[in-house]
Image (cartoon, rainbow, N blue to C red):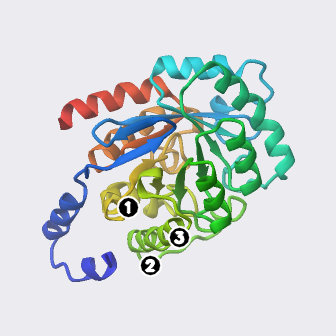
Amino acid sequence: MNLRGYFSQLDCQGLKEEFVKQTTQKNPKQFLIRDQVWNTDEPRIMGVLNVTPDSFYEGSRYFKHQDYALIAEKMILAGADLIDIGGESTRPGSQSIDEQEEIKRILPALQQIRHRFEIPISIDTTKPKVAEVALEHGADMINDVSGLASGREMIDIVKKHQASYCLMHCQGTPESMQVDPKYDDVIAEVVHFFHRSMLTCREGGLELDRIMIDPGIGFGKRQVDNFDLLKYIGAFNSIGSCLMLGTSNKSFIGNYLGRSVEEREAGTLGTLALGWRMGATFFRVHNVEGARDTLNIAKAYTN
């Protein structure tokens, strides 16, 4: 679908709003992870557990903790459906670490949580070697924020382990992504990226119901791009996979509201409710309890 060409032919806001309405209806998709089948009629929460010393949100840093399973337990009791473990910061301006250091960070958390809980576990990594080790030790999904930078190598590993995959759009790398990002039409360009990347996934034997897609709010995007992606996130329903929204405490919220990173919770919850209404199913968050309450209300309103 060429959204740029479509929108350029519209003569009034009403027609554009009708197009958005038609594309924000949740399709009866499914997502397969571990031994579970998740439908799009229920919002799903991914709790963030960062084993890094430098993630942008201090409340999600659990570097060198002794009991990661206890942290996961609190998230599970608060309503998390999925735990996302990250061993490398992907905040704007961050620098990459080597594979062995990333593996050293994530394995204790992964092993402790898997030993105690059956909850699906995602590993936030862009490195195929890290993904391979994590999947061998019980992870169920790879959350790849690189925009499939490693190509078929990553997909082949995910397929080999019969795992699931989150494909995110990113312009550039975390170190450089916020250095003057540019788009002519962010919606059209990100939709095109997903259609192209899905070909790589399918060529590697990875099925649509094992893939979720994330438009990458805050990853190589301007303020206007972030708000456009949120407003028109339903356009990505055309891809055929479930939608992930990751807005939690991000700078576009702080910039708009004039809030520090510790003061963005209310703004975050507003984006979650809007995201559910506009077609997202999965939500990556730092505050699981607040997200669950917000999404329960949003679901009640839309049912």
271 left or right of 285 in image: left
Q: Position of residue 64 (x, y in %)?
A: 81, 27
226 left or right of 219 in image: left
Q: Which of marks 3 and 2 is in front?
A: 3
- Mark 1: few/some/many CA within 10 Å (<14, 14-19, 20+): some
Element type at marker 3?
helix
Give the residue drawn at x 73%, y 41%: 87
Element type at marker 2?
loop
Label 1 sits on residue: 228
- Give the numbered dot on residue 218: none
Q: Position of residue 73 (x, y in %)?
A: 58, 18
Label 2 sits on residue: 184
Q: What residue type is labelled 3?
A: Glu
From the image, which quarter does the C terminus lie in?
top left
Label 3 sits on residue: 203
Q: Which amino acid does label 1 sit on?
A: Asp
- Label 1 and label 2: CA atoms lie apart by 12 Å
Lower position in the chain sequence, tag 3 or tag 2: 2
